[in-house]
Image: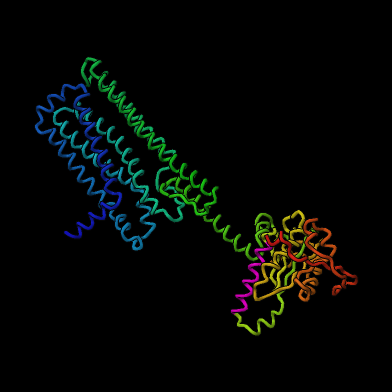
Amino acid sequence: MRRLWRALNWLWGTSWPLYAATVLGSNVLGALAIMLFVRWFIPMPELDSFETDVPYVTAIGIGYLIFAVLVGAAVTFLMFRPVLDWQRHPDEHDPNMVRNLVMRIPMYQAAVAGVVWLIGLAIAAFIAMSFSGRLALVLGVGILLAGAVMMLITYLEAERLVRPVAAAALARRFEDSTLEPPIKQRLRLIWIMTSAMPIIGILLMLLGQRLGFFSDDPYEILPGITVLATAALLTGFVGISFAIMNVVDPIHELQDAINRVRRGDSNAQVDIYDGSEIGVLQAGFNEMMRGLKERQRVRDIFGRYVGTEVAQRALEERPTLGGEDRKVAVLFIDVIGSTTFAVNHTPEEVVEELNKFFNRVVDVVHRNKGIINKFQGDAALAVFGAPITLADSTSHALQAAREMRQELKDLELQAGIGVAAGHVVAGHIGGHDRFEYTVIGDAVNTAARLTDLSKDTPGRVLTNAATLRSANEAERARWTVMKSVELRGRGEMTQLARPIRPTLADRS
């Protein structure tokens, strides 16, 4: 008894009570409607004598109605017991079995309703046959038409109400579009059952009048025709409403998800609850979003290794070996005394300090629209003006060098910084299976030589006069020209420049 009580509590805690009440209730209303229509709106003299001569006919009809409700509820519960068990213990059931069962619930429920209506039709026809074959034919046709309409309404109600369970069952990838009838067939069936069936009933009443099934007075079938016309309007409206919901609801959900994606929500997903082409469309959107999310993840990881701009360009274009001539500014930074620091500290401490150091270097470079081209142990190479063209790249590089001096002054690791501008070859260097984006040219070599000199220069930031001349006037005013020296590997003199003392404007 307690197990039964727990099962009932669990059942009430799900959407199944609403589902059962809606589906069974609509069929009860349909049965009552056809009973009232036959009794009051079919002008057959046999009906009056039928109720008088066949005792308990009304009681038999009501009794079967109650019996049909109980049997329908029991069969529905037994048929879908695996789904209820799956809801309680999802890990103990085969997801494919549950998915197939859940998506076919509307068809199975419509089939149960159809069997119940056919049994009722057989009982009514059998009783009427003992009294009048013509009456049995009229009752049989009327119940058959009403049952066909109620089967479709049952299917539409079940399909609508089972959506939350279907969404849970189809939460993962879904590709099978045969679990429910195609949309085109469903729309045609909705029209046939909800609009054409009542109209067929009207035509049959007119035909019955001509064949002498009904009263000789043609006006006596007018109320029945009016009721059937009203029923056609009502059932047609119900059918088209369900058809609209079947098609428009998923479209609205997809539209909302697309709008969330436009606002930057990369986790946007839609529920998959349809077993036809719409379900494939819903699953396709989710699969597309997973692909975009994975692409974004790869781009983020790729960008951390090679730089966001390089990663973006590599994803948008097909990278090829080779390069192009670009006018850029190069900033080279190298840690001072890194060997001694490594000897006096543990590897973990060295890595921690280097990460603190390079974190500030990266922030300053990115803030000034440059990219970190590569890390070389305890040194880094930053490029301004490639791969994305940057107006006044020299001024940005010089400003980054000045800001970097201030950002690094409170760290344990110190560094020399060199800046040089000029023409370089920027592109992909390496082999067909492994290459990297880099810049090669005299500006890179000059920046490296200036970095070596800067380690023994006050302020530890150097550039050359040629680079300084290509900067804007405001940036040139923040530097002072120094002596000329011959850089290693060069056969000519190079005039140096370094930042002047920070002004009040800098400190503000």
Which quarter of the picture shows residue 59?
top left
Is residue 364 among what the camera can see? Answer: yes
Q: Position of residue 11 (x, y in %)?
A: 26, 53
| Quadrant in which the N terminus appears | bottom left
Name the one closer to the observer, 309 or 163.
309
Is residue 441 among what the camera can see? Answer: no
Name the one closer to the observer, 462 or 85.
462
What is the total number of numbered labels drawn onto the structure image? Answer: 0
Name the one closer to the observer, 508 or 131.
508
Q: Main secondary structure of the magenta part?
A: helix
Q: Position of residue 135 (x, y in %)?
A: 19, 27
Name the one closer to the observer, 364 or 93.
364
Q: Position of residue 15 (x, y in %)?
A: 30, 49
Instruction: Provide the residue span drawn in magenta.
Output: 348-365
> In the displayed image of the protein, which residue is found farthest to the right?
492
Q: What residue is drawn where x is 61% and y is 76%? A: 351
Q: What residue is drawn where x is 40% and y is 45%? A: 180
Position of 351 relative to 170 (above/below): below
Which quarter of the picture shows residue 320?
bottom right
